Image: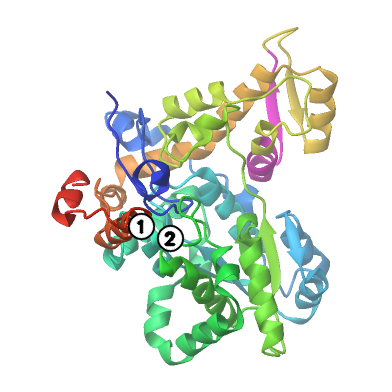
Amino acid sequence: MADIAYSACCAGEVGASRVLNCAHTRLNPEASMFESNRADQSKISTVEGPPAANVGIHRDSVETSSDDRFAALSSIGGEYIGEDKLRLLMKKKIAPICYVWFEPCDMMDIEQGIMKTIYVNKIIQAGCTVKILMADWFLQQHGMIGNDLDKIRDIGNYNIEMWKATGMNLDRVELVWFSDELNRHAVNYWPLAVDVSRKYSMEKMASYSRNRTYGPQTIPAAEIFYPCMQVAAIVCQKADIWLFSMDQRDIVMLARDYAEDINRETKPAIILHNKLPLLPEDPDMNLLRYTARTLFMDDAEAASNRKIKMAFCPPKVTVCNEFLEYIKYVIFPWFGKLELVEKKGNGSNKTYASMEDFVVDYESGNLNSEDVKLAFRKGINNILKPVRVHFISNTEAQTLYFARKLQDKIAADTLKIMLQNREIDSPWYMVDESQERSKFG
């Protein structure tokens, strides 16, 4: 029987709080790149580093036109809130401050690793001062971490090491830990968070919860207050620009609404970057407990290849073909092109300089879906190869790799919520807490 590691993301089975982009139950877990490649030390010297030039080399913003700077930002794609302000910032300000929201995650997927590297390097190329806000406090929602900020710091440092190995220009990035900011500026922050909580109803705050397991009567009280904290965190920072993923849009709009309510004179421009879809067609395979649902930064090459082979990519279909989004948001931004070898037909090589040209050919049936998968497999493994080498050869990286792992044990505060909910569902049922704890380690 497969080893099962329970976590908050598998709330449907154990009743814990669901947190996106965090640890999850692993059924038939794939081997990680470190665990499967430990013996491949002989290959290290032959691996080249990531093509940093393709993800943006910083050019002094004084020597770059405002149009070029804006073009670098607009190439991120997604949605822009306050686009006119963004253009004006590129014209008027030499080094606008751009904050990047990031919640540490012990299972780092390629969106958080590769795509975040691409976007941060583009923002640097646009001449911005980049600050990544490591939102460590918010990971306390995780059912297997609780208030263990030391463990969260280990996870965050592991994420940073991944960015370093991927080629993020960390020399030009300031890493800001939210817990440190909270300690230094508590007198300013907490009154703001409490003020947010006074201006919105409990029902509205509950609607922002990522928890999909409990009903509105039984979610942890923290799920109500976390949106207040996040709004305060966004408003508190002196940012000209914020970068968020698209799944944070609702909370971003809440922050802008609050800023208008308190008559905040300046509101930052917002860039919302796209998210990668899940790989399998079967909705049951897209549950958070299945690691095959997406590609992770620490996947071994064999694991990545297996996931790509299983991915749904219908031939001649470009609308709602989610696999093609991996080509669009990973391969083209990184390499600037897609190189494809046709196994069927005459076996010729094709190189596409734009997503548009590729889509036309694919839709016409000139390209085989298996050839497209093969091209993506080659590209993603070339990107991840230096990451795998780094975590095999670097002692500090190996230490962080193991330090970020979670024990298969639900945190005490999460267990307490579970017990409270059981009492609500069956008030006459008395439960022995010590026996209940023993079930979860």
The image's mark for residue 292 is none
| Camera-nearest residue between 352 and 415 | 415
**Residue 90, magenta (yes or no):** no
Q: Quadrant of the N terminus?
A: top left
Residue behind mark 2: 218
N-term-proximal mark, 1 vs 2: 2
Say left or right for 55 vs 422: right
How far is the residue under mark 1 from the one under mark 2? 6 Å
Secondary structure under tag 1 reads helix
From the top left corner, tell me how far across and down residue 412 is, in percent. 24, 60
Give how far across and how far down residue 73 sits, in percent.
72, 62
In the displayed structure image, the side of residue 338 where residue 109 appears, left or right:
left
Name the mark on residue 421. Answer: 1
The image quadrant that residue 31 belongs to is top left
**Residue kind at label 2, given as amino acid type:** Thr
At x 40%, y 40%, the residue is 298
As drawn, which residue projects farthest toward the front? Answer: 428
> How far from the left and from the top, in percent, is residue 70?
78, 65
Answer whether labels 1 and 2 touch (C-beta < 8 Å): yes
Residue 237: x and y in percent read 56, 81
Q: Is residue 337 magenta?
A: yes
Q: Dot 1, how many residues are within 10 Å of its Cα: few (below 14), some (14-19), or many (20+)? A: some
Identify the residue at image location x=71%, y=31%. 321
Q: In this view, does 145 lie above or below 191?
A: above
Question: Hey, what amino acid is under mark 1?
Answer: Asn
Front in this rendered view, residue 177 or 427 = 427
Residue at the image point whose x is 30% and y is 67% from the top: 147
Q: How crowded is mark 2: few (under 14 residues within 10 Å), some or many (20 or more)?
A: some
The magenta stretch is 327-342
Residue depicted at 68% across the width and 34% down the height: 322
